[in-house]
Image: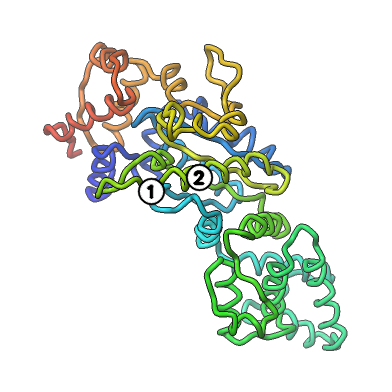
Amino acid sequence: MEPAFRESALESLRRGEPPLDLRTLKSITLGEQEGIWHFWRDYYLDDYIACGGSKVKFLTGKPGSGKTHALLLLLEEARQLGYVTFFASARHMRLNKFDSIYQAVLEAVDVESLVSSYCANVIRSLGYEPVQLNPEQDFFTWAQARGRAPDSLRREIQEKLDELYLDRKLNHNFALAFTQLCAHHLGSRRLADEQKETLQEWLKGRPLPARSLKPLKIFTRIDKYNARHMMASFLHLLRLCGRPGLCAVVDDLNALLERGTVGRALYGKAARNEVFESLRQLVDDFAGFAGAFFVFAGRNELIHDAKGGFISYTALWMRIRNEVSGQCPNKFADLFNQDHLVKEIFTGETCLELQQKINEVLGCNSGIRQEDFHCLVESVSMLSPVRRVIEAIVNQCDGGGIDDG
């Protein structure tokens, strides 16, 4: 491994964070088959969600239990399955207003790619194949060159686009903005560059002056009152464009209980209750958000804090709590504790395996004995044993245990 990548990975591990490089992350991953991300991929992303379902999951655990690690691997699995993916930290995004969530999700979306995918479906429905077109030529010009009368062709294209506008699962303004972008892409109705940019900005939820929207026949803005409906429209559009859906994860949900650098709470009681109510609505509105898989992750205080945790908001807590508990981790539970999985699979033997992986991937020469790992795993601490073991291995690297090759 390149020295820069190795040092970056080690620095992440020193901070108690997973490496950002995906290859490094996968190389030091233990128990892939037992991992919660693997289970969610098989039973949700590749099955239930792909068939039009929706689900909200909550992942909790001690610091260093592998929550962020699992989320990053889940997102990679989702990308490979064709999902639009989104990752954010509750410390950097306000969750008490749904329009901010919508804006953050759409910011990560390539609108032009969705337009191109939908236009490809329109072209096929008209009896052509998109691969027949030259990359630099629009469909309308291409079809005219092959004998199609412009008036009838324009009418047929508009009829196909009107099907989207008449779809009751799409907000009319959302459908109108998207169909105008499609008409421009197909060449049947051209937009000025400023108009095209305005439509794309509007779809992403950005505030725009009414004077720029009026010529485009759009008379509303995306705000906290209609953002939920717009998100449902976006999810429905993804499926029309051939994508299975959206996989969105929000980490550091314990920010709801934290204070900023000046000692002020990041979320007051009212704002925190707004977040909990939004989460409650997400849990209940499974039919309206077809194709969506949401995961919210944070520390155990999210559950146990009587004043600011889940149990303080009864409407949410009654929906996600585990009514039946057993000795084995229930991976179907909406509220999953990563610590239970760590307790089941993280032993002295797996610590040796982890040490070997880190030594091989990051060029370390750590030589901690199995009995020492047993002590780290069995000792009681506010930190997860995974964090404590990794810290011990990395400390040996910092102490001079680096193998230069």
* Mark 1 surroundings: few (<14), some (14-19) or many (≥20) residues within 10 A: some
Query: Is label 1 or label 2 in front?
Result: 1
Return the residue nearer the eye: 348 or 94.
Answer: 94
**Image quadrant where one finds the C terminus:** top left
SS for tag 1? loop
- Which quarter of the picture shows residue 123? bottom right
SS for tag 2? strand
Which percent across, then down, holds residue 126?
83, 71
The residue to which callout 1 is attached is: 91
Which percent across, then down, holds residue 187?
71, 82
Residue 133 vertical position relative to residue 27 in the rendered view, above or below: below
Residue 37 vertical position relative to residue 176 in the rendered view, above or below: above
Tally of numbered discs: 2
Identify the residue shown where x is 43% and y is 41%. Answer: 253
Return the residue nearer the eye: 215 or 374.
Answer: 215
Of pointers 1 and 2, the one earlier in the residue sequence: 1
